[in-house]
Every structure is written in C-alpha cells, then in structure tokens.
C-alpha cells in the first residue's frame, strides 16, 4: 500500500541512529567552519562597546569601594548589556532590565542556598534546575541571544561558600549595582545603534507553555548530567560543564546543535591557551580588567561570523573574571579544567539533543542532508 511505503523510509532515514550518522558526517564538520555575515556589524560593535563599558565601570567601582573582594559580582550584573542589541530603544531598556533581574536572582538564590547549608551535590542540582527556569524565562520574555547560558554563568559563580547572610546580601547588592550600570550605559549609548530589520516576533506570542517546559526539561537534564559528571570527577567548576551542555542545546535544529558543539570545543581550547598565557604572567588587577574589556568587545564583534571565533575570546574573558572573583583559584589548572568541562558539556549536549529529539527534528535534518547532497560539493 502506498501510505505505509512512504512512511517506512521516512522513519528509517529519520531514526536517531541515522541522525547521529548525519551529524558525524565530514560535511557537518565542513559546515561548522563556515563564516557568516552578522546582521549589523555596527550594532555588534556598539553592543561590544556597551558591554565593555559596563564591565569596566562595574569592576573599577567595586575595586575602589570598601569591598574590592566582591569585584566579580558587579561584572556579572554588567553582562545584562549583552542582550537586546537589535531591539527598539524602548524594548531594549525592558530587555536589559529583565536580564539584570535574572542575573541578580541567580546570584542571590545560589548564594542563599549555600548559606543555608546546601551540600555541593544539592548545589549542583539547584544549578541544573536554574538552567531550565532560565530557558523558560528566555523564551517567555523573548530575550534572544546570548540566551540562558549567561544567567547560568552568573549563578555558577555563586556556587562558592557564603558563610554569612551579610555576604549573601553583599553579593546580591554588588550584582544589582553592575546590572544598574549596564542599564545606564545602554540607555546613554543606544542612540548610536542603527535600525536593523530583523524578523518580528510571532504576533501570537511565545509558544505554549508545555513546549517551553519540554525544552527546559531536556536542557535541564543535559546540563545537570554534565555538571554532575564534572562534580563526581572532582573538578572545581561544574557550572562550566552545565554551560557547555546548555549552550549547544539552545540550537533550534540538530545540525545547529552539532555546529555549536564543535565550534565551542575548538574555540574553548584556543581561548584557554590564551588565558593560561595571560595568567602565567601573574598580571595585576588593572591589566586583567583591560584584558576582560578588550576580550568582551571583540567577542561581540566576531561571534556573529562564527561561534568558534567568539569562544576564542569569551573563554579567556570568563576565566579572567573567575580569577578576579576567586583569586585563590589555581591559575595553572583552571584553563585545563575549562577545556575538559566544555568537552564533557558539549558532548552530553549533543547526545541528549539526539536522544530527546522529536521526529520532526530528525525529519528536518534528514531532508536537509539530502538536499545538500543533491546540490553537490560546495553546497555549504
């Protein structure tokens, strides 16, 4: 009969094993090397300047304050400036404010859990749950890139011990200060941006909550598994593994997920080497600040061309910020652990993306591969 005859090949070519073969094909690696053009180089540059200014003011004011030991937390709040670069002026202010709130919430909740005596294993579990909640928030409020991973990065920085309630409040207030600076910088400089005609959000609103919950649950499971593997291995920063898994699972399609996994691993290895070379020189505070600001600017400028390019600069930036927040960190092993965490997280992310993919996801991938092969060499 014709209907079963059509369905069998469709399901066979769209099985999970077939999808895995497509993703491991040499052409997929070739695709990950493609260099695209960002929607607006001007806006990417302005976003880089805004984020760099927010981080500089956040770190500088914290350093000269009576609480220089908290210098990393205002910087975390300053990351709110990364969001909404293509939004209208009014929507940008709303987006940055929401992102500032989410960054503060992550630092506060994880710090409070530490103060209340949560053991390390439970802290990792709370972090994993936060990945899912941040995923829903990002979808519901249409926050766009760079997505939930920035909020997870901030929450992960609060995994360290918080012995007193005063310290919990101090970390929270410091993060609020950084978020306020990010909002202020964006308001003052958004007029420099050019208007870019981006696809408008769906007028019907975000997808149904059940779909958001499914996506969040999948990412939570992947990020949690990666983080617990890192924790069980005795690594100091299991949040990096969670970030690695969450970042690749944010892809809208399986081939995008695979591209991000490969690009993230390659970019992280190179970026970790750069961070190791800098930290090996035992740089002073202001030199680290300068490096963070420069890396942040270039990240926003080049990440639109290829995700790996952005990882080359964002990795040393993240490691240097971690060094400021946790000065006792072993600078010789921290870049190495970042590489291992990223590889574990990216691998778990792609495995879980395939395992929990829908039939529609796999059919889309199969059709895309057949289309590209029909077009022959150079289709990418």
Image (cartoon, rainbow, N blue to C red):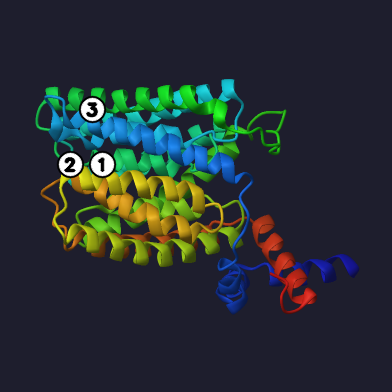
- Classify 259 as above or below 140: below
Q: Residue at x 72, y 79 (%)?
A: 377
Question: As rendered, which of 66 and 31 lies closer to the eye?
Answer: 66
Percent coordinates x, y for residue 323 in the rendering: 20, 48
Task: Give the residue at the far right of this rendering.
Answer: 2
> Dot 2 corresponds to which residue?
160
Label 3 or label 2, whichever comes before in sequence order: 3
Q: Secondary structure at mark 2?
A: loop
Q: Quadrant of the N terminus?
A: bottom right
Question: As rendered, which of 260 and 313 lies closer to the eye?
Answer: 313
Query: Which mark, by number, is residue 61?
Result: 3
Q: Quadrant of the C terminus?
A: bottom right
Visible residue check, residue 68? yes
Visible residue check, residue 112? no
Rounded to the nearest whole Å, what is the CA distance between mark 2 and mark 1?
7 Å
Asked if labels 1 and 2 touch by Cβ distance under 8 angstroms, the answer is yes
Q: Residues within 10 Å of mark 1 (few under 14, many from 20)?
A: many
Percent coordinates x, y for residue 95 in the rendering: 51, 27
Q: Residue at x 62, y 75 (%)?
A: 27
Total marks in image: 3
> Dot 1 corresponds to which residue?
157
């Amino acid at each position: 009969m014709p209907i079963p005859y059509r369905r069998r090949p469709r399901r066979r070519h769209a099985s999970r094993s077939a999808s895995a073969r497509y993703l491991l094909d040499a052409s997929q690696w070739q695709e990950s090397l493609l260099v695209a053009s960002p929607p607006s180089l001007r806006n990417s540059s302005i976003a880089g300047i805004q984020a760099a200014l927010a981080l500089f003011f956040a770190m500088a004011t914290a350093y000269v304050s009576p609480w220089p030991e908290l210098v990393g937390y205002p910087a975390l709040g300053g990351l709110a400036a990364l969001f909404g670069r293509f939004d209208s002026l009014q929507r940008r202010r709303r987006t940055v404010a929401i992102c500032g709130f989410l960054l503060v919430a992550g630092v506060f909740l994880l710090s409070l859990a530490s103060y209340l005596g949560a053991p390390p294993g439970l802290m990792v579990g709370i972090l994993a749950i936060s990945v899912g909640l941040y995923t829903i928030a990002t979808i519901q409020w249409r926050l766009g890139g760079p997505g939930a991973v920035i909020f997870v990065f901030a929450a992960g920085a609060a995994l360290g011990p918080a012995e007193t309630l005063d310290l919990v409040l101090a970390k929270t207030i410091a993060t609020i200060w950084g978020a306020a600076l990010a909002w202020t910088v964006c308001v003052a400089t958004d007029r420099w941006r050019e208007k870019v005609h981006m696809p408008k959000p769906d007028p019907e609103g975000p997808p149904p909550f059940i779909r958001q919950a499914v996506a969040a649950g999948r990412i939570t499971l992947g990020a949690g598994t990666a983080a617990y593997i890192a924790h069980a291995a005795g690594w100091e920063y299991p949040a990096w593994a969670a970030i690695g898994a969450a970042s690749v699972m944010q892809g809208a399609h399986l081939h995008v997920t695979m591209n991000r996994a490969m690009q993230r691993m390659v970019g992280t290895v190179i970026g970790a080497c750069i961070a190791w070379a800098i930290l090996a020189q035992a740089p002073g505070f202001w030199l680290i600040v300068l490096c963070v600001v420069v890396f942040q600017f270039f990240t926003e400028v080049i990440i639109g061309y290829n995700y790996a390019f952005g990882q080359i600069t964002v990795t040393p930036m993240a490691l240097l910020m971690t060094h400021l927040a946790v000065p006792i960190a072993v600078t010789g092993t921290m870049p190495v652990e970042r590489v291992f965490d990223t590889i574990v997280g990216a691998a778990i992310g792609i495995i879980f993306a395939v395992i929990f993919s829908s039939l529609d996801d796999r059919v889309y991938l199969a059709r895309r591969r057949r289309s590209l092969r029909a077009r022959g060499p150079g289709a990418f």
